[in-house]
Image (tube, rainbow, N blue to C red):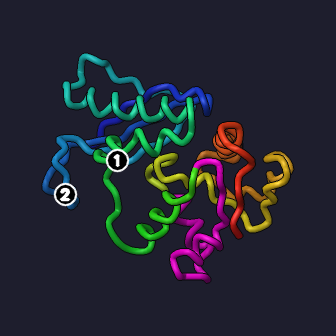
Amino acid sequence: MIKIYSFPFPLIDGYVWLHYRLNDEHTQVPSSKTYIISKITFHQHAQDMAPQSLTAEEKHVLDVAKEAFHAYSQSCSVLTNQSLTLCDYLLWPTSGFAHKVQQALCGIPCGEVRSYGSIAQQIRTPKSARAVGRVCANNPFPLIIPCHRVVSSQYNPHKTLEDNSSYLGGYMYGLTTKKKLLNHERLSYTLPHYTT
């Protein structure tokens, strides 16, 4: 049974929803954790759950997630470092094209962007830029897998995000949220480096 717990994420003027469940024989991934996070989503409203209904282990998972997202809000590079513990609770895909794309996305440093085509080149499937976009659109763990750092090949790193609005590509939570995340990272670092 999937449970959902939410907490505020002011950076996007909304909430993070953690979709999690018991780790059992149907998971098909090795993990010593009692609970696993199957998906993370962003929403404009909270999903209420009475704190007293949570077990101690559930509270621990949720505290780890809240700490990681709070750390990202303070300094975008911290999410990758601090979320290593959080990653232990994630239900990762373990093979196939999506796995290769997600591994490539995780290699994009905070403060940098890549094009869909450059990701396709990186995973040695140069004609798969559209398929890379589909994987980004179905990313189960936004920010942990930074699909917001993938943009159109027409993106110009020397222009403002507003001037690049037509070239940001898509984002499952809308371009306004994508701009907020990229702007946060631009302010934390220098102008993003861009690889076509």
Residue at 46% across, 48% down: 144
Graded by Cα atoms within 10 Å as few (under 14), some (14 to 19) or many (20 or more), the crowding at tag 2 reads few
Residue at 66% across, 57% down: 113
User: In which quarter of the view is residue 7 placed?
Assistant: top left
Q: Position of residue 145 (x, y in %)?
A: 48, 53
Indicate left or right for 127 with 40 as reference: right
Q: Is 35 or 31 nearer to us in this picture?
A: 31
Q: Which stretch did the figure color magenta?
A: 110-138
Q: Which residue is mark 2?
A: 30
Indicate left or right for 193 with 83 as reference: right
Graded by Cα atoms within 10 Å as few (under 14), some (14 to 19) or many (20 or more), the crowding at tag 1 reads some
Q: Is 182 or 4 nearer to us in this picture?
A: 182
Q: Quadrant of the N terminus?
A: top left
Q: Earlier in the sequence, mark 2 or mark 1?
A: 2
Q: What is the three-letter code of the residue carrying label 2? A: Pro
Indicate left or right for 134 with 84 as reference: right
Q: Which residue is mark 1?
A: 87
Residue at 81% across, 53% down: 164
Residue at 29% across, 45% down: 89
Q: Is 135 or 154 nearer to us in this picture?
A: 154
Q: In this rendering, is residue 97 above or below 70? A: below
Q: What is the three-letter code of the residue carrying label 1? A: Cys
Q: Position of residue 56 (x, y in %)?
A: 19, 25
User: Does residue 117 show up magenta in the picture?
Assistant: yes
User: Does residue 120 show up magenta in the picture?
Assistant: yes
Q: Quadrant of the C terminus?
A: bottom right
Indicate left or right for 152 with 5 as reference: right
Q: Secondary structure at mark 2?
A: loop
Q: CA distance from mark 2 to mark 1?
A: 13 Å
Q: Position of residue 64 (x, y in %)?
A: 34, 32
